Image: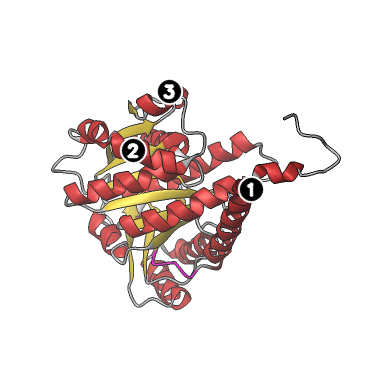
Amino acid sequence: MKCALVGVGQAGGKVATALATFDTRMEFGAIRSALAVNTATADLQPLPLDTVLIGQDRVDGHGVGGDNELGAEVMESDLPEVMDALDDKITSETEAVFVIAGLGGGTGSGGAPVLVRRLKRIYNVPIYAIGILPGQDEGALYQANAGRSLKTVAREADSLLLVDNDAWVESGESLQEGFDTINKHIAQRLGLLLAAGEAVEGVGESVVDSSEVINTLATGGISALGYGAAASGETAEDNINTVTSTTRSAMFTGMSLPGATKADTALLVVAGRPETISRKGVERSRRWLEEETGSMEVRGGDFPLDTDRIASLILLGGVEQSDRLERFIERAREAVEIAKEERADPAKAFDNEAIEDLF
């Protein structure tokens, strides 16, 4: 799929960079352009992408401090500058645009929905969002921001692909190492999905193309992406069980939104050398996916790739009923209530007749 990336905010810029770097290193050619947009100069400076600094008249390049209402305001004000920067990046060959943002911060969670809405009004291609949910330990402000942003961007985008920060963090990692791991996982998984059909090595029996991805996401709402891989046998017959086991692994332990198993639509992509991809394994896995998701609209195909592994990618569309998502919404609701209480009257915390006022 030939696509353009727009990273909004700190997390969005880093993920867009990771995706573009992965695509270039693998020589897939799916990422045709990438842009990073932010209110903080320091976050844009290290990125090897074209960048746009917004909100200079409001925050002078220092960021919005987690205020996603301010993030939305400055994006709305500076949309002409952002759209000018995208003018030569979204071309007639672009098949989709991905707006990427961390949903818990200020610039990304506030600015991404505004940008998605404007892009949908102007361009006649799918406008997707990739939203990164804050982990459970990232604080009430991030939970509240993410709840509001998720609700808004899911309504505006053609589909919102969610990545839970708690899904791919490895034990023992520091916070920064955890973020780097998540970015790497997003780049690998989404990079492979977007490249399917673009950089085909050899001839597959049923090669996935961009229309399969677009049709899977056509239901709108929330989507999720899973990945599983294992060493490949030498022949297709050797890999019947490998294909089925990597598909199950992608579903149960490799999803960007853990616990998302019920879906309206699904796409299974099996990557590997053409002679090692088992058609029997792919068909078994596709039927299993139908049963597991409860969907009658499950697509499947190959991604011929010169590798000594078999990898299964699962794209699920319409996963709003995920238990993990419901728990997050409840967490966000509680965080909003806490924030309201804290803003009500901070001075009441010091009500004590034993302490005299200064005035």
- Which of the two labelled residues, at mark 1 and mark 2, occupies the earlier sequence position? 2
Helix or strand or loop: what does disc 1 sit on?
helix
Residue 218 drawn at (x, y percent): 28, 64
Q: Report which residue position mark 2 lands on.
A: 75
Find the distance from the CA under tag 3 to the CA under tag 2: 15 Å
One can see residue 154 in this view: yes
**The quarter of the displayed image where residue 333 is located:** bottom right
Query: Where, quadrant-wise, is the C terminus in this rendering?
Result: top right
* Percent of width and height locating residue 55: 37, 29
- Is 232 placed above or below 112 here? below
Res 270 seen here: no
Q: Name the residue under label 3.
A: 41
Task: Identify the element where label 2 is drawn.
Answer: helix
Instruction: Name the one closer to the observer, 106 or 326.
Output: 106
Query: Where is 272 relative to 107, above or below?
Result: below
Asked whether disc 1 touches disc 2, contact meaning CB atoms under 8 Å apart, the reply is no
Which residue is depicted at the point 24% across and 45% down? 2
Q: Where is residue 246 in the image (x, y as percent from the top left)?
A: 50, 60
Q: Callout 2, which amino acid?
A: Met
Pointer 1 or 3: first along the chain: 3
Query: What's the CA distance linking mark 1 and mark 3?
Result: 30 Å
Q: Specify start and end residues of the magenta stretch as a single range.
A: 317-321
Label 1, label 2: how many angstroms apart (C-alpha)? 27 Å
Answer with left or right where residue 117 lies relative to residue 228: left
Q: Nearer the viewer, mark 3 or mark 2?
A: 2
Residue 25's place in the image compared with 246, above or below, is above
Q: Which of 332 and 339 is in front in this view?
A: 339
Q: Earlier in the sequence, mark 3 or mark 2?
A: 3
Q: In this view, does 12 lie above or below 148?
A: above
Magenta: main secondary structure equals loop
